[in-house]
Image (tube, grey):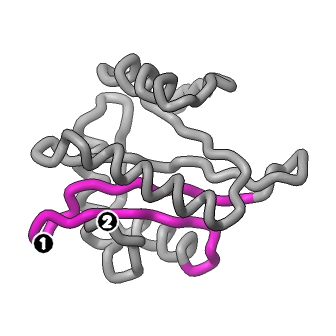
Amino acid sequence: MIQEATFADLPRMAETARQFYAASPLLADLQNQKFCETWHRLIETGIGVAFIEYAGDSIAGGIGAIVAPDPYGNTTIASEAFWFVSETSRGTLGIRLYRAFEAWAKSHGVDSIQMIHLMDSTGAKVRNLYLRMGFEPVEVRYQKRLN
């Protein structure tokens, strides 16, 4: 059953985030405590929202977003910050998580959702999924590691 994440879920969410980081060569240096502190603040202030589903005592998957006014207009944007489903739970869980997030966004007056994906081995697959779901590409973000 998909549920909105609470403070109590954060340590297990951090464990799931660690799996996500380990699955991509593009990500590094996940700090569990920092993850928990950041999402605690985001949830507490209403800026962040996350939806999760458990499989036993572990989180099978989750999607989280940061919700904020468009800095240049009068709309509200929910920007995905993570979307991950453990390898053993892949199938329909990812789409069900997304649908819970989209339904929440609509019911909270969000004007648009922005989704992201890593440019790793799953990049084309995720990009194609977004296109099938009705998303349009808006911009590409580049990163340069300095250390």
Crowding around mark 2 (Cα neighbors within 10 Å: few <14, some 14 to 19, many 20+) is some
Q: Is residue 91 above or below residue 51?
A: above
Q: Are marks 2 and 1 in contact (CB under 8 Å)?
A: no
Where does the magenta region start and end?
A: 44-68
Q: Is residue 50 above or below residue 11?
A: above
Q: Position of residue 134 (x, y in %)?
A: 56, 29
- Disc ID at residue 2: 2
Residue 109 appears left or right of 88: right
The quadrant holding residue 143 is: top right
Q: In the image, what residue type sits under mark 1? A: Asp
* SS assignment for the magenta stretch, majority: strand
Q: Dot 1: what SS? A: loop
Q: What residue is drawn where x is 39% and y is 72%?
A: 5
Q: What residue is drawn where x is 56% and y is 75%?
A: 41
Q: What residue is drawn where x is 72% and y is 59%?
A: 68
In the rendered image, is residue 65 in sight? yes
Q: Is residue 47 magenta?
A: yes
Q: In the image, what residue type sits under mark 2? A: Ile
Give the mark toward the camera: 2 or 1: 2
Residue 17 appears left or right of 44: left
Q: Quickly name the residue at label 1.
A: 57
Estimate the spatial distance between the alpha carbons at disc 2 and disc 1, rounded to whole Å: 14 Å
Q: Is residue 88 above or below residue 43?
A: above
Does label 2 or label 1 sit earlier along the sequence? 2
